[in-house]
Amino acid sequence: MTTDQPAVIILNYNSFDDTLGLINSIEKYDPGLCIIVIDNASGAEDRRKLADLEGRCITILLEENGGYAAGNNIGIRKAEELGFDTFLLANSDTRLISSHAISDCYAYMKKNRIGILGPRMINKSGEDISGIIHVDRYGRTGHQFTDKITECKSLTGAFIFIGKQVIDRIGYLKEFYFLYREDTDYCLRAYNEGVKVVFYPEVTVVHKTGATTKNVAEYYYYRNSFILSREIYKCKRAELALFYIFRFIHYSLGIVKRKAPLSEKTVRLKRLWSAYLDGVGDVRGKAGISGETVSF
C-alpha cells in the first residue's frame, strides 16, 4: 500500500448495498486505493456483511452512532495513523463513472497546493446537483453551477478531498452538528483561515442524494442552519429567531397545501417546528424529533 494517494473514507449506516456499490466502482475505475469503512453502529445484518469485505478495505465498527462528522473524523485519524496526507470523504451513495477520477483530483490538488477540493456531482438523470456553495449570514445556501475550475468558499461534502495541512490548521469536522451543515462549516472555517478551496468539474461523480437520511433531513438541516449562523457569522439568538419565524410559517403553509396524507403533514410540521425551537435554543448533537429516535 502506498500513501502517495488519498485514503477513501466511507461512512456506513445500514447502507451496506450502497457502500458495496461505491467500493465496486472505486475498484473498477480507480483501483489500488486504501478504503476505510466506518460503520456507525449499524444493525447486525450490515455488520455481518461488512465482515465479508475483509481484504478489500479496512473496517472500523463503532458501538455508538456519533453522527456524520464523528464517524468521518475517526476515519481521518485512522488514515493519518497509516501515513496518508489526503482524505476523500465519500458518501456511500456516490459512484465513480470515469477512470482515474480520484487519482486525477488528487494530482490536481497536489500540483496546485489545494487544501479542499470537490468534483462536479450529478444525479442519476445526469442533472447537476452540486457545485459551488454560497452561504449568507443566516446559513441559507445556494448552488452555482459552472464548467470552470473555480476557487470558492464552500463545497458539498458528499465527495470531498481534504488535505492534512487543513486538519493541522483548523482541526477536524465539528461533531456537534451530528448530521448536515458540518461540511459547509468546515469549508468556511478553512477559507477564513486562508485555505484554498476549489471546485473541480473536470471530474464528475454520481450522487443518489439522501439515501440514508431523508426521514430526518429537514430537522437537522434547518436546526443546524442556526448553529452555522452562530459559529461562522456570530448571529445572536433574537436575530435568528426573528429572521426564521416568518420563513418557517411560509414553509409550514407549503406543507399544509401539499397533497399528502394528514399524518404525513403532521409529522413534517412537528419536525419543522422542532428544528425552529431547537435552533433558537441552540440544541446540538443527536436529537429526538417529536418522539422519533434519529440516527445516521
Image (cartoon, rainbow, N blue to C red):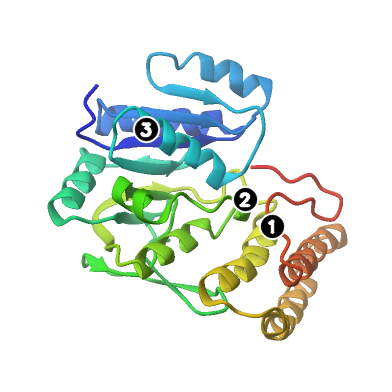
- Category of crowding for the residue at label 2, using alpha-carbon neighbours closer than 10 angstroms: few (below 14), some (14–19), many (at least 20): many
Of 60 and 213, which appears nearest the observer? Answer: 60
Mark 1 and mark 3: Cα distance apart in space:
27 Å
Residue at x 55% of width, y 18% of height: 49
Q: Is residue 193 left or right of residue 185?
A: left
Q: CA distance from mark 2 to mark 1?
A: 8 Å
Q: Nearer the viewer, mark 2 or mark 3?
A: 3
Query: In the structure shown, which secondary structural element does the residue marked by tag 2 occupy?
Result: loop
Counting from the top left corner in percent of width and height, residue 102 is at 26, 41
- Residue 137 lies, with reference to residue 206, above or below; the image says below
**Which three-letter amino acid code belongs to the residue tagged 1?**
Arg
At label 3, which amino acid type do we have? Ala
Q: Report helix, strand or loop for mark 1.
A: loop
Residue 284 got which mark? 1
Q: Is residue 191 left or right of residue 106?
A: right
**Kind of element beneath mark 3:** helix
- Residue 285 location, x and y as percent? 68, 52
- Residues at marks 1 and 3 touching, judged by CB atoms closer than 8 Å: no
The answer to whether residue 274 is visible is: yes
Identify the residue under disc 3. 79
Circle on res. 178: 2
Tell me which residue sits at (47%, 29%) in the image. 37
- Residue found at x 60% / y 28%: 62
Q: Dot 1, how many residues are within 10 Å of its Cα: few (below 14), some (14-19), or many (20+)?
A: some
Q: Residue 266's x, y, as percent?
A: 85, 63
- Front-lying residue, 134 or 28: 134
The residue furthest left is 111
Is residue 295 positioned above or below 257 on the image?
Answer: above
